[in-house]
Image (cartoon, rainbow, N blue to C red):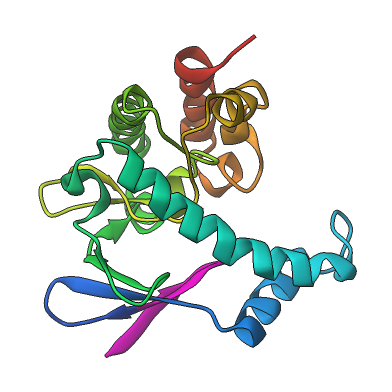
């Protein structure tokens, strides 16, 4: 089993059968991941690390409850198989971040259009990914379809959904800033504002 990635919540391992294992960080590992992310503590204090760590697990478990309560196609979320919560298996796909590294501007814009269509369908089901984090939380499957690969930060509460939309979560640097192609980044923000923005 080979480690192929990690994020705030999980280490990701290739199972070699077209599937990946997402293993939730131990408390010590989560502290380390958070410390690296918030250093040099300009926006968040070092004292917030313990609450961030505890909150990550609660967020993931609440997100799984969101999936249970709502009608979300398994195709959209990579056919997860839940193990010892919050660990799970999922289809192996290509993260959008990796796709954007080699794609030209037009191809990136086309993927952004697919992403918007996908999230409109997700919203119709009463759900959003907390930050609409296109490069980190989504991937392309073997058929070139968008799927949500980070299922640990889902909202189905209308107030929380509207708050994220009003605050234009997609425009934040940790989301839009990860689209390195400047023209595509501007297109992403403009189209997201048009399709999901609330005034």
Judge from the rendering whether residue 8 lies leftward or rightward of residue 141; answer left or right: right
Q: Quadrant of residue 92?
A: bottom left
Q: Which quarter of the rendered picture does the N terminus lie within? A: bottom left
Give the residue displayed 58% in from the left and 22% down from the top.
162
Give the residue displayed 67% in from the left and 68% down from the top.
54
The residue nearer to you, when weighing 166 against 61, is 61
Q: Which residues are magenta?
A: 1-12
Q: Is residue 137 visible to us here?
A: no
Q: Residue furthest bottom?
A: 1
Give the residue displayed 42% in from the left and 74% down from the top.
5
Judge from the rendering whether residue 196 lies leftward or rightward of residue 159; answer left or right: left
The residue nearer to you, when weighing 58 against 90, is 58
Would you place residue 45 above or below residue 172 in this image? Answer: below
Give the residue displayed 51% in from the left and 44% down from the top.
179
Count of number-bearing discs: 0
Q: Quadrant of residue 186?
A: top right
Q: Which quarter of the rendered picture does the C terminus lie within? A: top right
Would you place residue 99 above or below residue 23 in this image? Answer: above
Residue 167 drawn at (x, y percent): 68, 27
On whether residue 130 falls in the magenta region, the answer is no
Residue 127 drawn at (x, y percent): 41, 33
Dominant SS of magenta comes to strand
Residue 181 drawn at (x, y percent): 49, 41
Q: Quadrant of residue 40?
A: bottom right
Judge from the rendering whether residue 156 lies leftward or rightward of residue 112; answer left or right: right
The residue nearer to you, when weighing 175 against 179, is 175
Would you place residue 189 above or below residue 45 in this image? Answer: above
Residue 108 drawn at (x, y percent): 35, 38
Q: Is residue 27 visible to us here?
A: yes
């Amino acid at each position: 089993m080979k480690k192929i990635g990690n994020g705030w919540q999980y280490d990701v391992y290739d199972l070699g059968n077209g599937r990946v294992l997402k293993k939730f960080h131990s408390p010590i590992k989560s502290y380390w991941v958070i410390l690296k992310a918030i250093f040099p503590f300009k926006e968040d204090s070092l004292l917030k690390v313990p609450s961030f760590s505890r909150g990550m697990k609660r967020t993931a478990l609440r997100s799984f409850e969101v999936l249970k309560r709502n009608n979300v196609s398994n195709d959209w979320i990579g056919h997860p198989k839940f193990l010892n919560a919050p660990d799970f298996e999922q289809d192996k796909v290509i993260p959008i971040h990796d796709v954007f590294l080699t794609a030209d501007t037009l191809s990136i814009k086309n993927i952004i259009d697919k992403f918007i269509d996908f999230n409109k369908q997700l919203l119709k089901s009463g759900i959003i990914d907390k930050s609409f984090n296109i490069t980190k939380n989504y991937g392309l499957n073997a058929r070139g379809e968008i799927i949500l690969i980070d299922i640990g930060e889902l909202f189905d509460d209308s107030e929380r959904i509207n708050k994220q939309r009003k605050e234009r979560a997609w425009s934040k640097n940790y989301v839009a800033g990860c689209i390195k192609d400047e023209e595509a980044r501007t297109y992403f923000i403009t189209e997201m504002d048009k399709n999901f923005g609330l005034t």
